[in-house]
Amino acid sequence: MTTRIHVVFYSMYGHVYRLAEAVSEGARKVVGTEVSVYQVPELAPDDILEKTGAKAARTAFAHVPDAKPEKLADADAIIFGTPTRFGNMCAQMRNFLDQTGGLWMSGALVGKVGSVFTSTASQHGGQETTITSFHSTLLHQGMIIVGVPYSEPRLVAMTEITGGTPYGASTITAADGSRLPTENELAIARFQGRHVAEIAVRLTR
Ligand SMILES: Cc1cc2nc3c(=O)[nH]c(=O)nc-3n(C[C@H](O)[C@H](O)[C@H](O)COP(=O)(O)O)c2cc1C
């Protein structure tokens, strides 16, 4: 039996996309899994994306298919990635989740594993609040929340500035978006993918 892991992300400039790739890589390492990656549809108007440079950045992941709310029911575990907006998930992700009322009505996500990762511009810009407030939606859907346990020693790295929280993987982009996920952050994201997949496999056997 195959355990199906979905990685569902929104990214404007590519940082969350890079974490999504690392999360997927980690999940794929677990025998018996099938990992699918989806992106949440864009809501921002084209001219704004053009002005902010997001349009060019988004070509790097234009090949990733759009997420569809009803497809979440096919997964055994869903790992969500969102940039932080004012200490919360982005509107694109919120809009996507607000289309899962039908899944909530039928209890389609009850008992599935849910996990979240994020990025912020600044070091203390709200990574934990984004992830833990995201968890409320997953709990309403009856999902089993999984984070990143401290058995991942990179969470306590003190020799460099790094993202990575026990609630979920994260990266820091800098105000101009110039900082890309570091190897430490990518390794934590891979750990999260593998950890979620291992738990999902155990729950589906
Ligand atoms: C409207 C808006 C609100 C934001 N709020 C925060 C914030 O609360 N804290 C923070 O550190 N960064 C904030 N940022 C920066 C984003 O988190 C950053 O651009 C994002 O993590 C980059 O991820 P991406 O490359 O995947 O789009 C905000 C950006 C925008 C456009």
Image (cartoon, helix red, strand yellow):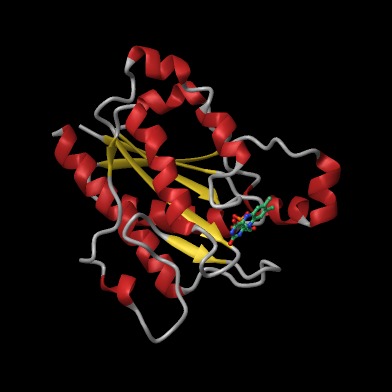
Query: In the rendering, at what x and y percent does residue 10 appear?
Result: 57, 44
Which residue, as the protein is rendered here, is positioned at the far bottom?
159
Displayed quadrant of residue 202: top left
Displayed quadrant of residue 103: top left
Query: In the rendering, at what x and y percent does residue 180 appear?
Result: 58, 70
Q: Nearer the viewer, residue 192 or 85?
A: 85
Asked whether, in this view, residue 21 is left or right of residue 175, the answer is left
Q: Is residue 115 above or below residue 13?
A: above
Picture quarter with the N terminus? top left
Going 25% across and 34% down the picture, which residue do you hit?
A: 2
Q: Nearer the viewer, residue 193 or 109?
A: 109
Going 66% across and 71% down the picture, which residue do you hit?
A: 178
Going 54% across and 45% down the picture, which residue do you hit?
A: 89
Q: Is residue 135 above or below residue 190?
A: above
Going 32% across and 56% down the picture, which residue do you hit?
A: 192
Q: Nearer the viewer, residue 61 or 11?
A: 11
Asked whether, in this view, residue 200 is left or right of residue 48, the answer is left
Q: Is residue 117 above or below residue 144?
A: below
- Can see residue 36? no
Number of labels in the image equals 0
Displayed quadrant of residue 141: top left
Picture quarter with the C terminus? top left
Query: In the rendering, at what x and y percent does residue 199 appear?
Result: 20, 45
- Quadrant of ligand 1: it is bottom right
Asked whether, in this view, residue 111 is left or right of residue 131, the answer is left
Query: In the rendering, at what x and y percent does residue 111 appear?
Result: 24, 29
- Can see residue 186? yes
